């Protein structure tokens, strides 16, 4: 009887999920199929004829040093920014997880950066850092220091600072929401056992919030990997190609050099490089959620 009931529930679940699955297929599978079709085609903007070339575009992209350097920079940028944002966001969430005067106003101000479009934030940041009219270079000049965003020693740090200013609010909001769902009885039991605040944080709060923080980390790093607009507006991928993300590389290949086949193959390769990590990451999340119950 229970077997029949479970089977009926599964069938009902598939039937009810069918519209969403069809929509996802249309939004994901079909574009990926078209992208793959383009990736095995010689499709150059300056030429009127397109024709199949097999995996020639893939051989070209895998032997392209700029492609691998863009992936390396993207991963370094994404990991650095995400780790800093997660630490700052969680620290701020701990500070706001209590009552103090002016909390509502400060909480609202904390969320302002994520309400601004990344492209607009990048334009504002570039004006602030402009060597001729920017306030920060002007203040540094008064104390005998010079600053240029295109300086090899400054550009990476400047991009990280911009990303941290804009997206720390995201990690803060999700971390704060997770803290608000923590049962107060756990803190009371820890206090009765004589645990200090630091012991409660490391032995109670963090182990329980580990799955939630892992999800925040995943969401943020995936978003960082596809960063395009802010870096493109600030540096255009320069100086040279030192700050060229994989998104900027694909954009330039397609819309500046006009090679859509090569750009599509680069996008497919990026998907294939990231896809194997997803099942193991999701499995770890499920295990963490099971341990926290």
Image (tube, helix red, strand yellow):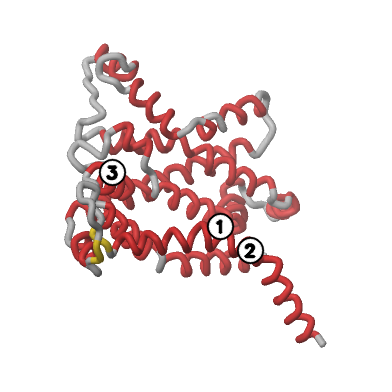
Q: Residue farthest to the front?
A: 48
Residue that label 2 marks: 292
Task: Find residue 73 and report its horizontal and vertical position in percent.
Answer: 28, 49
Crowd rating for badge 1 (residues with CA inside 10 Å; few <14, some 14–19, many 20+): some
Quadrant containing the N terminus is: bottom right
Q: CA distance from mark 2 to mark 1?
A: 8 Å
Quarter placement of the C terminus: bottom right
The answer for how far apart the CA atoms under marks 3 and 2 are is 48 Å
Q: Are the two marked residues, 3 and 2, in contact with CB atoms closer than 8 angstroms?
A: no
Residue sitting at the far right: 1
What residue do we see at 61% from left, 43% from top? 176
Mark with earlier residue (3, 2): 3
Report helix, strand or loop for mark 1.
helix
Q: Does label 2 or label 1 sit earlier along the sequence? A: 1
- Residue linked to disc 1: 210
User: For the residue carrying disc 3, how many other residues have a C-alpha within 10 Å: few (<14), some (14-19), or many (20+)?
Assistant: few
In the image, taking residue 28 as reference, residue 123 lies left or right, namely left
Location of mark 3 (residue): 255
In this picture, residue 182 sits left or right of residue 250: right
The kind of secondary structure element at disc 2 is: helix
* Res 273 quadrant in image: bottom left
User: Where 163 sits versus 205, above or below?
Assistant: above
Q: 118 and 93: which one is in front? A: 118
Contact, mark 2 vs mark 1 (Cβ under 8 Å): yes
Asked if residue 244 is positioned above or below residue 35 in the image, the reply reads above
Residue located at (38% from left, 61% from top): 271
* Location of residue 164 (image quadrant): top left
């Amino acid at each position: 009887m229970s077997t029949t009931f479970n089977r009926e529930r599964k069938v009902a679940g598939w039937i009810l999920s069918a519209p969403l699955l069809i929509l996802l297929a249309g939004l994901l599978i079909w574009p990926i199929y078209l992208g793959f079709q383009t990736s095995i085609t010689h499709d150059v903007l300056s030429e009127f004829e397109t024709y199949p070339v097999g995996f020639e575009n893939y051989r070209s992209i895998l032997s392209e040093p700029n492609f691998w350097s863009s992936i390396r920079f993207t991963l370094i940028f994404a990991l650095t920014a995400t780790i800093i944002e997660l630490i700052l966001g969680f620290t701020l969430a701990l500070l706001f997880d209590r009552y103090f005067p002016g909390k509502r106003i400060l909480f609202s101000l904390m969320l302002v950066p994520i309400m601004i479009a990344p492209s607009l934030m990048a334009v504002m940041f570039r004006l602030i850092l402009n060597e001729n009219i920017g306030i920060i270079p002007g203040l540094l000049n008064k104390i005998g220091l010079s600053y240029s965003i295109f300086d090899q020693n400054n550009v990476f740090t400047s991009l990280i600072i911009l990303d941290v200013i804009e997206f720390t609010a995201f990690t803060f909001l999700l971390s704060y929401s997770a803290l608000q769902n923590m049962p107060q009885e756990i803190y009371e039991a820890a206090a009765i056992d004589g645990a200090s605040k630091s012991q409660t944080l490391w032995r109670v709060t963090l182990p329980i919030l580990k799955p939630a923080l892992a999800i925040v980390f995943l969401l943020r790093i995936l978003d960082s990997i596809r960063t395009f607009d802010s870096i493109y507006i600030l540096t255009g991928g320069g100086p040279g190609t030192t700050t060229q993300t994989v998104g900027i590389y694909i954009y330039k290949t397609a819309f500046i050099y006009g090679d859509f086949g090569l750009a599509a193959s680069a996008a497919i390769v990026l998907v294939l490089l990231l896809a194997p990590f997803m099942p193991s990451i999701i499995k770890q999340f499920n295990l963490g959620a099971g341990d926290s119950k």
